[in-house]
Amino acid sequence: MADNTVPVIVEDREIQSMIYTFRGKQVMVDSNLADLYQVTTKRLNEQVNRNKNRFPPQFMFQLTEDEYRDLRSQIATSNDGIKHGGRRYMPYVFTEQGIAMLSSVLRSNIAVEVSIRIMDSFVEMRRFLVSNQELFSRLDRVELKQIETDKKLEQVFNYIATRTEVKQHIFFDGQIYDAFSFIVDLIKKAQNKLVLIDNYVDTNTLNLLCKKNNGVSVLIAGSGKGSLTSKDISKFNAQYQGLLVKTRNDFHDRFLIIDDTEVYHIGASIKDAGKKSFGITKIEDQTLLDSIINKVK
């Protein structure tokens, strides 16, 4: 029977753009080969299925879903025009030996002609890879160094993020949990001693202070305008120990002193944290810090 197919004029460079690497082998996709051979992908795979004994795994294999996604990502950055829409199965790919075998099962002049062109393209690709092996090796080393550098930079940034302390915090009305959580974190910083200067103290204040570390003493200094009772103090000390309350009227604002080394100015009584907008500021001026600590002693 006469072969009525029209020879396809295709550039070697175009064929080379259709060659991919999977599982360490250079391969071409069934749909691309079908276009070159002027047959449908279905027809090409039917011929392969009729001659399965001629196509062992080293000649052809089916891509996995992950490999197919990788293929499509490569296609998105190229212009090879591969057809991938509407497939009901993962595509088959053919190695150089498999492509040579295809020409024998398709039995057409165009298949023979195209297969020869493809073989030449494979040879040219191998020659290119061998001649540029050192360049690719250098690029791999550069990429590895870049990955290592990126990881180190990420570690540095993470370290800075976890070690850098924000000196001022603003909590708006309704941010009760955020304010509660932040104050508890401050309380837990103390290793030996906490001093709270606050004129309005009640059991809500004690609910925060009970989060302290074991063995940390607590001094509450204020005018006693809150609802805290001696019974509340006794109950606290029965379970957590170390609470002492002193009355003094020389402070208007609220302060939290941690281990006689850090002082925080608090814009509202901690029992009301988050109910209205307020701020917490760490005092950095050493002279002010020492003055407040000495005044409480």
Image: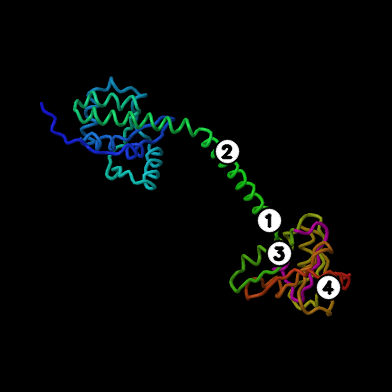
Local SS, label 1:
helix
Local SS, label 4:
helix
Q: Can you identify the residue that label 1 sits on?
A: 160
Q: Residue at x 68, y 53 (%)?
A: 159
Q: Position of residue 128 (x, y in %)?
A: 44, 33
Q: Nearer the viewer, residue 67 or 9?
A: 9
Q: Can you identify the residue that label 2 sits on?
A: 141
Task: Sort mark 2 into few (<14), some (14-19) or many (20+) by Cα contacts within 10 Å.
Answer: few
- Give, as a three-letter code, the residue at label 4: Leu
Whether the magenta-drawn stretch holds residue 265 is answered as: no
Q: Can you identify the residue that label 3 sits on?
A: 208
- Give, as a three-letter code, the residue at label 1: Ile
C-alpha span from label 2 to label 3: 54 Å
Q: Is residue 200 above or below residue 57?
A: below
Task: Sort mark 4 into few (<14), some (14-19) or many (20+) by Cα contacts within 10 Å.
Answer: few
Q: Is residue 66 above or below residue 241?
A: above
Q: Position of residue 36 (x, y in %)?
A: 25, 36
Per the rendered image, the range of residues in magenta is 189-206
- Give, as a three-letter code, the residue at label 3: Leu
